[in-house]
Amino acid sequence: MIFDVVRHRYVTLTPEEWVRQHFTHFLMEHKGYPQGLLANEIQIKLNGTSKRCDTVLYHQDLSAQMIIEYKAPTVEITQKVFDQITRYNMVLHVDYLVVSNGLEHYCCKMDYENQTYHFLPDIPDYQTL
């Protein structure tokens, strides 16, 4: 078990949870993301089924700003992973999508006007979002 400071409770420490805990602490401690605007395991409805976003960062007005999807370190980041987070974004319409397996991290900024996205060289600091 590990204490999740975002959910304020103990959770089972699976390999994916290990990535989530390290990544959320990285965001808060090194990138300046406010703990109060992060939420873990957010349920959404997609095509009549319930899905869970691993982590969502919210704007001050509580609209979703970023979706973060985690995989265990042994799981390769593939197009299938990006397809999953893209489906979640059909519901939330965020500015940023992030995928991490704890070893590799990818962040892209959505460009809705041109119906595309751009990969960023790094996870942006909170102040630059």
Image: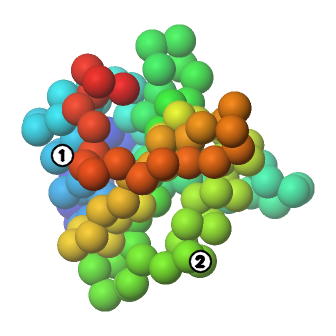
Instruction: Pick whichever of labels 2 and 1 is earlier in the sequence.
Output: 1
Q: Nearer the viewer, residue 89 or 36?
A: 89
Residue pictured at 36% horizontal, 42% vertical: 7
Q: Nearer the viewer, residue 101 or 38?
A: 101
Q: Is residue 82 above or below residue 88?
A: below
Q: Is residue 79 visible?
A: yes
Q: Is residue 9 visible?
A: no
Residue 34 screen position, x and y as percent = 27, 25
Q: Which residue is mark 1?
A: 25
Residue 80 screen position, x and y as percent = 59, 77
Place residue 62 in its image quadrant.
top right
Place residue 47 in its image quadrant.
bottom right
Q: Secondary structure at mark 1?
A: helix
Q: Which residue is situated farthest in the top direction here?
A: 61
Residue 105 screen position, x and y as percent = 30, 62
Residue pictured at 62% horizontal, 66% vertical: 84
Q: Which residue is mark 2?
A: 80
Question: Pointer 1: residues within 10 angstroms few (<14), some, or many (20+)?
Answer: some
Residue 113 screen position, x and y as percent = 69, 32
Question: Pointer 2: residues within 10 angstroms few (<14), some, or many (20+)?
Answer: few
Q: Secondary structure at mark 2?
A: helix
Q: Nearer the viewer, residue 3 or 49?
A: 49
Q: Classify the position of the C terminus by image quarter.
A: top left
Q: Is residue 61 above or below residue 129?
A: above
Kind of residue indicated by mark 2 = Lys
Kind of residue indicated by mark 1 = His
Place residue 74 in its image quadrant.
bottom left
